[in-house]
Amino acid sequence: MSDTLLIVADSERNADMLYATRMFAPDAFIWFRHRGRSAVVMNDLEIDRARKEARVDEVISQTAISRPLEKRLGRQAKLGEVIAAIFKQRGIRAARVPSSFPLALAEQLRRRGIRVRTDDRPFFPQREIKRPDEVRAIERALRITEAGLAAGIATIRAARIARDGRLTLTGATLTSERVRAEIDIAMTRLGGIGAHTIVAGGAQACDPHERGHGPLRAHQAIILDVFPRDERTGYYGDMTRTVVRGRVCDALRHQFEAVREAQRVAIRAIRPGVNGRTVHRAVQRLFEERGYKTADTTHTSPPVSSARAAAGHMQGFFHGTGHGLGLAVHEPPRIGVVPARLKAGHVVTVEPGLYYHGVGGVRIEDVVLITADGCRVLSRFPVELEIR
């Protein structure tokens, strides 16, 4: 097994590259680690910044490598040729790369005698266990998340209820788009980047990844799922609240109470050594005991009598209980149907949900740090259903 690791990617979007270098760069560059020493290969535009910011042992000038190559080749050097030249200088004959490594680049390296391989293992398994500075970065991202949630809920609370049930604000219909904008603006002021923020009401809230669009209505559940990236560190926050402006019907209130209790059950169960699937099954069991069945209504009748189900929809609890959070908004470990042993230092979301057409969707999401003897909730935002 080669001890050489190789990544070619930008660090704005590639979490492994950001983890390796701690430097943001919008264009792809080269990072490798050989015999315990790390290096980046940078173009002239980024090399001075890399020398100041990149957390590596060596910064190599791409121009210094490519210039003699281009003189010999009589053309611009390909990226694979640059990497091969550096590796041959250092006696490197093989490297392990991430599963996302570009195929064309891998072929360039292979043609030049560099063996490239990948496998299903995480490229940096140590990313799963968060250092204290990473936990602090996630907590900062959560404070940004909470500011966004506060702005969104304040906007909904300030709305008036029109005679036809629409929510209105300053004489105009309140829409998902308007609330989403208020959330994202609040987070931007604190250095957070909101992307695909969810503000989904009514039937739209029954699709967990529906962003939400159009008018919001009173007396219906509105799901706000907010997951900004802190532009300073690259770490994510992730929280969800479900609110109703107006009156809450009994069926929706009972659904909300079941989700709230399911989250408590999950948090009590999370500790080092526990299988995430065990936590997930505990949530499923609570929902089943309370009569909240999960079904595909394409083939099955409505799972609960209070739900006026529309055919062709999944209903009940049909997603995972949680996922890892860090430099990616979804990363290992998962708390769901696939086994995953939880460890101290994992930071995970806990987000059970129930979705029934005719009643509404409810999801509550918070973030916990798994400690030596249990877990600590990192989120601070209050949970309330009915807002007036």
Image (cartoon, helix red, strand yellow):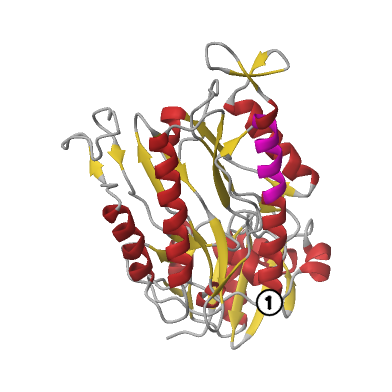
Residue type at mark 1: give it.
Answer: Pro
Residue 29 on image: x %, y %: 64, 61
Q: Residue at x 74, y 37 (%)?
A: 185
Q: Along the horizontal axis of the image, is 171 left or right of 312? A: right
User: Between residues 214 and 150, which one lies in front from this camera angle?
Assistant: 150
Q: Is residue 24 visible?
A: no
Q: Quadrant of the C terminus?
A: top right
Query: Hey, which quadrant is residue 265 in on the image?
Result: bottom left
User: Between residues 93 and 133, which one lies in front from this camera angle?
Assistant: 133
Write the start and end of the magenta stretch as one range.
146-156
The reply to whether the magenta stretch includes residue 8 is: no
Is residue 225 shown above or below 93?
above
Q: Is residue 27 visible?
A: yes
Q: Residue at x 53, y 83 (%)?
A: 373
Q: Point out the residue furthest to the bottom here.
A: 35
Q: Residue at x 75, y 70 (%)?
A: 54
Residue 137 on image: x %, y %: 70, 65
User: Between residues 39 and 322, which one lies in front from this camera angle?
Assistant: 322
Tag 1 secondary structure: helix
Q: Along the horizontal axis of the image, is 2 left or right of 133? A: left
In the picture of the structure, the residue carrying the numbered disc 1 is 132
The reply to whether the magenta stretch includes residue 155 is: yes
Query: Hey, which quadrant is residue 91 in on the image?
Result: bottom right
